[in-house]
Image (tube, rainbow, N blue to C red):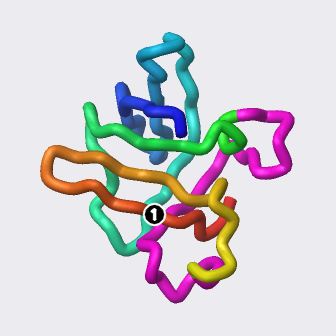
């Protein structure tokens, strides 16, 4: 899992994420359903396939929701690459990819 720090959030839900180990920056449109979205300084943990434009999992737009959300795949059948972590000052949450 790649640890990505939220360094900027633009008006159109475009998140700029920084991998502080590699100094690589990523920009994605991210939507969060049924949860408080990440804030500046929060950490998102992404599988590297979600960051690799050559991967079949890659998209420029992702929607994530709670692991027990009725939307998206059932948690029993979900591909582990489609799970992300959200680390905030208050919580550590596992989210699943709804679409994108």
Q: Is residue 69 above or below residue 78?
A: below
Q: Is residue 97 left or right of residue 45?
A: right
Q: Is residue 100 left or right of residue 37?
A: right
Q: Which residue is at a point 53% across and 66% down the rendered structure image? A: 96
Hey, which residue is sitting farthest bottom in the picture?
Answer: 70
Residue situated in front as seen by the camera: 78 or 31 = 78
Residue 31 x %, y %: 49, 58
Was residue 87 drawn as part of the magenta stretch in this picture? no
Residue situated in front as seen by the camera: 65 or 80 = 80
Was residue 62 drawn as part of the magenta stretch in this picture? yes
Q: Which residue is at a point 41% across and 36% down the rendered structure image? A: 10
The answer to which quarter of the image holds residue 76 is: bottom right
Q: Magenta stretch: dominant SS?
A: loop
Start and end of the magenta stretch?
52-74
Residue 97 x %, y %: 59, 64
The answer to which quarter of the image holds residue 94 is: bottom left
Residue 87 x %, y %: 30, 46
Residue carrying label 1: 95
Quadrant the N terminus occupies: top right
Q: Is residue 38 above or below residue 7?
A: below
- Numbered disc 1: secondary structure: strand
Q: Is residue 70 above or below residue 27?
A: below
Q: Which residue is at a point 59% across and 70% down the rendered structure image? A: 98
Q: Is residue 43 left or right of residue 96?
A: left
The answer to which quarter of the image holds residue 4 is: top left
């Amino acid at each position: 899992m790649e640890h990505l720090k939220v360094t900027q959030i633009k008006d159109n839900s475009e998140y700029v994420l920084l991998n502080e180990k590699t100094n690589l920056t990523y920009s994605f449109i991210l939507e969060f359903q049924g949860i408080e979205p990440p804030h500046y300084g929060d950490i998102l943990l992404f599988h590297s396939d979600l960051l690799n434009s050559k991967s079949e999992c890659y998209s420029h737009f992702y929607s994530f929701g709670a692991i027990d959300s009725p939307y998206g795949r059932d948690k029993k059948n979900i591909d582990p690459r489609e799970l992300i972590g959200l680390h905030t000052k208050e919580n550590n949450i596992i989210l699943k990819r709804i679409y994108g």
